[in-house]
Amino acid sequence: MKRHKSQVQDFMTEGPVVITPSTSLVEAYNLMFDHEIRRLPVIADGELVGIVTLSDILQATPGYFDDADMETRLEMAARTVRDIMTYDPVTIAPEDTIQEAAERLLEYQISGLPVVQDGHVVGIITESDIFRLLVDAWSAE
């Protein structure tokens, strides 16, 4: 089977929304909601240190976004991304191929990869981006 040679940089979302480890879970959730995204790279001193997903937040805050009592809301509002983020996430470089990105997503059973160049997050590529590429390729046939 032929390998796909397109590069990640041609399909990634550039300049993704990022947060710091001290960002509250509520603030991270609101950023995801406002930007219609499901994952946020976590940056400290300009470099990637982790990633947090919507699923991570919802699992860590059961009931918070429903009808939780005030005590539960205050407790959850005090929690930060540092408490639940995945440290040292799997990444990819902008010049790597889409095929390599897809293989990493499958291998690690994740849905998105921060795109890192020289230690800095320059983008993010998700399973939706790769799926969009596939649909576009089929449409062109």
Image: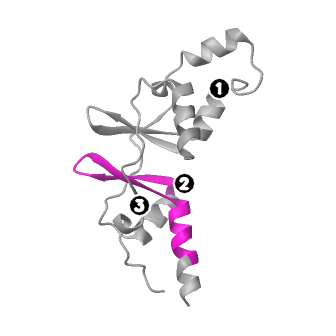
Assess whether mark 2 and mark 1 are in contact (beta carbons under 8 angstroms): no
Q: Which mark is residue 12?
A: 3
First of labels 3, 1 by sequence position: 3
User: Which portion, as a residue range, is magenta?
Assistant: 106-135
First of labels 2, 3 by sequence position: 3
Viewer-proximal residue among 128 and 119: 128
Q: Which mark is residue 72?
A: none
Q: Under tag 3, what secondary structure?
A: loop
**Residue 19 appears in which quarter of the rendering?**
top left
Instruction: Give the image location of residue 115, x and y in percent.
Output: 36, 54
Q: Is residue 133 magenta?
A: yes
Distance from the alpha carbon under mark 2 to that under mark 3: 13 Å
Distance from the alpha carbon under mark 3 to that under mark 1: 30 Å
Q: Amino acid at mark 2?
A: Ser
Binning the other alpha carbons within 10 Å of mark 2 as few (below 14), some (14 to 19) or many (20 upward) gives: some
Instruction: Give the image location of residue 82, x and y in percent.
Output: 45, 26
Binning the other alpha carbons within 10 Å of mark 1 as few (below 14), some (14 to 19) or many (20 upward) gives: many
User: Which residue shows up at 31% across the image and 61% down it?
Assistant: 94
Q: Which mark is residue 61?
A: 1
Q: Amino acid at mark 1?
A: Thr
Q: Amino acid at mark 3?
A: Met
Distance from the alpha carbon under mark 1 to that under mark 2: 21 Å
Q: Under tag 2, what secondary structure?
A: loop
Looking at the picture, does residue 74 appear above or below residue 62?
above
User: Which residue shows up at 75% across the image and 27% down it?
Assistant: 66
Tell which residue pokes out farthest to the top in this image. 71
Viewer-proximal residue among 107 and 72: 72
Q: Which mark is residue 111?
A: 2
